[in-house]
Image (tube, helix red, strand yellow):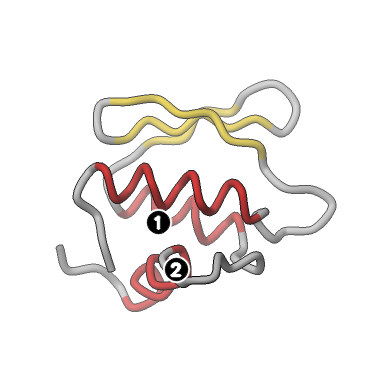
Amino acid sequence: MQMKRKHQKTLDLIFTRPVNGSIKWKDIESLFLELGGTLEEGEGSRVGVRLFGERRVFHRPHPSPDTDKGAVSSIRRWLESNGVNP
């Protein structure tokens, strides 16, 4: 899949080892949208992501805009299991 350089950079960061803890959540949301996903606002900081025929719920980070390492690992596994790699 051909994607904009910004989204490719985010994808590369998600697959970096060791896990990167400085990926901006808004960049991950943009990547989900680029891959054909939709976002659904939930209670508080929850956001539902519908992608690959599945719905996953994540928590937007606060007060920092950076996604925590556990969420990045979970997102990487989800993308990988659906054939998305950098």
Q: Earlier in the sequence, mark 1 or mark 2?
A: 2
Residue that lies at the very extreme toward the left in this rendered image: 1
Label 1 close to label 2 by CB (< 8 Å): yes
Question: Crowding near pointer 1: few (<14 within 10 Å), some, many (20+)?
Answer: many
Q: Quadrant of residue 24?
A: bottom right
What residue is drawn where x is 15% and y is 63%? 1
Q: Is 55 left, or right, of 22 in this rendering? A: left
Name the residue type under label 1.
Leu
Q: Is 75 left, or right, of 70 in this rendering? A: left
Residue designated by label 1: 31
CA separation, marks 1 and 2?
Answer: 7 Å
Residue designated by label 2: 10
Residue that lies at the very extreme toward the right in this rendered image: 63
Residue 81 image position (x, y, % from top left): 26, 43
What residue is drawn where x is 70% and y is 21%? 43
Count of marks, rendered view: 2
Question: Which one is nearer the viewer's eye here, 82 or 9?
Answer: 82
Q: Secondary structure at mark 2?
A: helix
What residue is drawn where x is 84% and y is 52%? 63
What residue is drawn where x is 51% and y is 51%? 73
Q: Secondary structure at mark 1?
A: helix
Residue 38 to residue 72: above or below: above
